[in-house]
Each structure stands twice: as structure tokens, then as C-alpha cells.
Amino acid sequence: KAGVTQTPRYLIKTRGQQVTLSCSPISGHRSVSWYQQTPGQGLQFLFEYFSETQRNKGNFPGRFSGRQFSNSRSEMNVSTLELGDSALYLCASSLGWETSGSTDTQYFGPGTRLTVL
Amino acid sequence: DAKTTQPPSMDCAEGRAANLPCNHSTISGNEYVYWYRQIHSQGPQYIIHGLKNNETNEMASLIITEDRKSSTLILPHATLRDTAVYYCIVRVAGGGGADGLTFGKGTHLIIQP
């Protein structure tokens, strides 16, 4: 079974621009979570989508948004980019609690490395 | 804040067992212990998880103390490719995890040739 895929793998943008990142989950997985990883803050949870609905959200400004499509693929958008948004953006997929029961293991993609100049 | 405490770094000789400790003294009865690892600049890789019994899979073994306040991840025969940052995470079971996985700083395991 193919793993989580993310596109693009690398991206360079300038301040003020906006960016859209894409994530394709493992086949059959309905939950997609996004994380940001920076050297200073480590790995931080952004938000989670399940069945096209955002279920949970981390402590990030409204410039960070996302959506999920009916095929479970997800996109993340960052508007008005700032230098501090330079990071590795990771997507993780899982079956969803409703399917997996008491444990719902997340599997991560390779990430998108975003550099803001 | 992360609910786990791990040593920042550890060394292990290639071919030996690597034992990575994790303290989670405030763990609740419905929280699982998960282990992930991250090789430089790659996405975290799931290793193993458990509730209260010891667990083993093709990658590693997880030993959880009887009081569940600490655990140890064991890589039985470490190789150079096991050099990575290892994260110990506790996560509530069954419909919880409202804030996603909470990663701490992890343990940087360095396998020495």
C-alpha cells in the first residue's frame, strides 16, 4: 500500500505571497492532520480534517487554513507569508477514531520544505 | 506541553541493543504510549505503541512498567540507519487526541560504528 504523499517537496516563496500544499493520504484513511516543524518550536499540530470537516485545530493564526476533499486528499494554505513560516510542513493520515477504535495511528508523509525569502 | 520526559541524546554501538527510556509519570488510564522516530529532515516514522502490556513488532519492543509511569523502547540490534530522533508520545484513546500528537524534543540516538 502506498504511503502518504506530499507535493511539492520543496518550495520557495517571498514574503506576502500565499502558498498551497497538497497531501494524499494512505488509501482508506479518512483523517488527515497537518503539522509544522521548525528548529525553534519543534513539531506542532496545525489542524485535523475528517470527512471534509475540520475537527481539531492547533494554536496558529488564521493565515493557516486547510480543506479536505471527498477523496480524503487535503490541501493546506498559508496566506500572506512571513519569514517565520519557513518550515517543514508534514501531513499525517490515519483511519480515524471512528474506524480504528481505541487507537488511531498516524502515518506521516515526507513533508514539504517551505522557504520564505 | 509534552507529557513525556526523554534524555536529549544517547549513543549506542552498532549491533548492540539500544534502550531508549521515557518518563510519563502523569499518564492517564486511557492514554497510550506511542513511539515515532525521525531521520534527518524526513517525516516521522511510526515505530510501535502500547497501553500496558509489552509489545513487539518487526522494528522494536516496547516495555511499559507496571505502574505505567515509564517505558523503554528497545531496538534489538542497532544499525547505523537507526540514527534518528526518537519521540515518545502519550495519547488518549478512543476519540480523543483533540490537539493532535504532541511532540517533545525527543532523544537523539546516535549509533556508533
Image (cartoon, coloured by chain):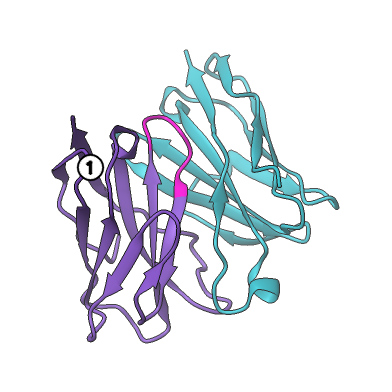
Chain colours: A cyan, B purple
Whether residue A69 can be seen here: yes
**Magenta stretch: dominant secondary structure:** loop
Question: Residue at point 14% right, 45% down?
Answer: B10
Up the image or down, B99 lies above or below B64; here it is above
Q: Is residue A91 left or right of residue B38?
A: right
Residue occupying image coordinates x 28% and y 54%: B76
A14 relative to B51 in the view: left or right: right
Determine which residue is flagged by label 1. Answer: B15
Q: Residue furthest right?
A: A70
From the viewer's perspective, is residue B64 above or below residue A61? below
Residue type highlighted by circle 1 = Gly
**Residue situated in front as seen by the camera: A5 or A74:** A5
Magenta-drawn segment: B39-45
Where, by quadrant of the figure, is residue B62 drawn? bottom left
B42 horizontally vs A48: left or right: left
Q: Is residue B1 visible?
A: no
User: Which residue shows up at 48% across the image and 51% down it?
Assistant: A45
Residue B44 located within the stretch drawn in magenta: yes
Q: Residue at x 34, y 76 (%)?
A: B54
Residue B75: horizontal and vertical position, in percent? Answer: 29, 53
Q: Quadrant of residue A37?
A: top left
Q: Secondary structure at mark 1?
A: loop
Relative image position of residue B28 (x, y in whole percent): 34, 83
Residue B25, quarter of picture: bottom left
Q: Chain of mark 1?
A: B
- Percent of width and height locating residue B5: 20, 61
Is residue B18 highlighted in magenta?
Answer: no
In the rendered image, residue A49, in percent from the top left (x then y), is placed at 67, 56
